[in-house]
Image: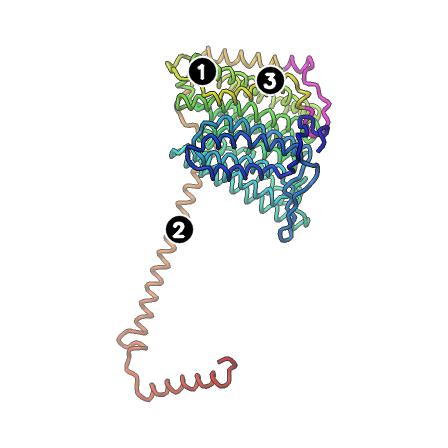
Amino acid sequence: MRPEEFPLLLDWGTPLGLPPAFIFFAAAAIIAMLRGDHQQLAKRAVLLLVPVIGLWNLTTLSMGPSWVIDVLDFQLVQLRVDRLSLLFGLLFHLGAFLGVLYALRVRDDTQHIAALVYAGSALGAVFAGDLISLFFYWEGMAVASAFLVWGRRTPESNGAGLRYLTIHLISGLLLLAGALLHFQATGRIAFEYVGLGRVEGWLILAAFGIKCGFPLVHNWITDAYPQSTPSGTVFLSMFTTKVAVYALARGFPGADILVIVGTVMAVFPIFYAVIENDLRRVLGYSMINQIGFMVVGVGIGTELALNGTVAHAFNEVMFKGLLFMTMGAVLLRVRHVNGSDLGGLYKSMPLTTIFCVVGAASISAFPLFSGFVSKSMIMAAMIEEGHDVLWLALLFASAGGFHHAGIKIPYFAFFAHHSGLTVKEAPWNMLVAMALAAGLCILAGTWPALLYGLLPWEVAYAPYTYPHVLIQLQLLTFSALAFAWLKLSGIYPPELRSVNLDADWLYRWLGTRAARWTLGAIGFAAAGIRETARDEAAALGGKLLGRRGLLTRPTPTGAAALWVGALLAGYLFLYFFVPGG
């Protein structure tokens, strides 16, 4: 790859040319071999060097497919390089570096190994050139990331991790079924445009939709993410949903149904986020809201919309990761992130507060912050394609996103009231990771040409025009005034210790009862089979071994001799006339 083909990546010397996933898998194996606390320094060095070496390797990749493996009738392409996969590869290396830096003080090898395998699987999925390889990396992400949820080692995280793994394995099975049907219909398994013309397209879309958090299958985000470890949630926020967005952009650009689905995703989480008390769960709903914008962009399918989708995915990793980092720091120091019991932490954690405000401004699309230069591309594409009503819905979703993520998160965590909490500032490694993420948010917002130069398609868009800036400032101003008025008038929902019912209640309720009914039916059938078998065995025993049974009743000598003769004749016939007898 020549430097001019990918402006930010320069040739650093000796090429590696490896599939990026392999480097992360090798590092996970090294961490597993470095046993004991006395190896902590070596482990931390490996963790920090892996994304750096991976980025170096990224600069040496040549455009096109390579590392092709023939298995049965399939050609498995482990490395398909183009501008779309390169952008996500760069994004995931940056995200992995921020994640390992944030988790550097964690003394849990299981979490570190799971994080490396998770990041490697995400990179493998992005660079996979066929649907079968994509499936294996898809399931690798599911299994590895589940350990980040279980890493908290509480009854709640154990249950959430099991539910998380179950739904992601279902996603993988749908992907595999769609891939095999696609191969049967076309004779090819290349991962390219799929479309919705046949049943396999719908199966693959369902698989991608589960990982994207489509409505009614979104609850794994708000269920598992708040139960993960502080560092585990940061990794979770960076990879799974972004791989799904990449897969949608690769396989289903221009699918009209995604415009509707994405709009619903952007709108409905607002109402849940406003009443939610757990601030990490609020960020989970906020993530669904932001992914909705990306899904809309894929559904529109124009170059402007797809560029906006990819750019917003890039920015969302940074600002959502930053917000999860700040809440993880609060969780580390306070042991909870309930908005009803926080407040006043700006005095104890001033740097964390500043970084949280930067993340809030970025996700709210303030001018000069990253969200503004990417979300506005999707909104502009909607207007160009004539989706005026849905544009208004997304405008409402933008205002709602500012309410729950831009205002609620920093306000209730750090400013709402003085909770009496006095804690230490976050550890240095967490602060450095937050500072780097905040710097990237500001850099992308103030120098959008840098980000636009990485996008897969040519960009002819200027975010900082008078109408764009004015409309966005008006939206943010009136949204802030609405929040202030609702809060002062007492109408705004208070932060309460409560459990909010979501769509998962339905299938948990139905699933529990279906499981009980199924187990009851199986038990009833088994009991009937045992009873019938016992009766038949008793009857047969009576016929054979009873008082006048076949084997116990007196037999005349002549009859016995006749039976012995018949058996001897049969034996002789087999011995002399049957070959091999």
Q: Nearer the viewer, residue 3 or 173?
A: 3
Q: Is residue 174 magenta?
A: no
What residue sits 44% from the left and 41% below the top? 511
Q: Which residue is mark 2?
A: 521
Marks 1, 2: nearer the viewer: 1
Q: CA distance from mark 3 to mark 2?
A: 60 Å
Closer to the camera, 270 or 351? 351
Mark 2 residue type: Ala
Q: Are marks 3 and 1 in contact (CB under 8 Å)?
A: no
The answer to whether 290 is drawn above or below residue 514 in the figure is: above
Please provide percent x and percent y for residue 75.
Answer: 65, 48
Q: CA distance from mark 3 to mark 1?
A: 21 Å
Taking the magenta stretch, the answer to whether it contains residue 458 is yes
Front of the two marks 3 and 2:
3
Residue position for label 1: 349
**Stretch of the chain drawn in magenta:** 452-471
Q: CA distance from mark 1 to mark 2?
A: 57 Å
Q: Is residue 302 above or below residue 570?
A: above
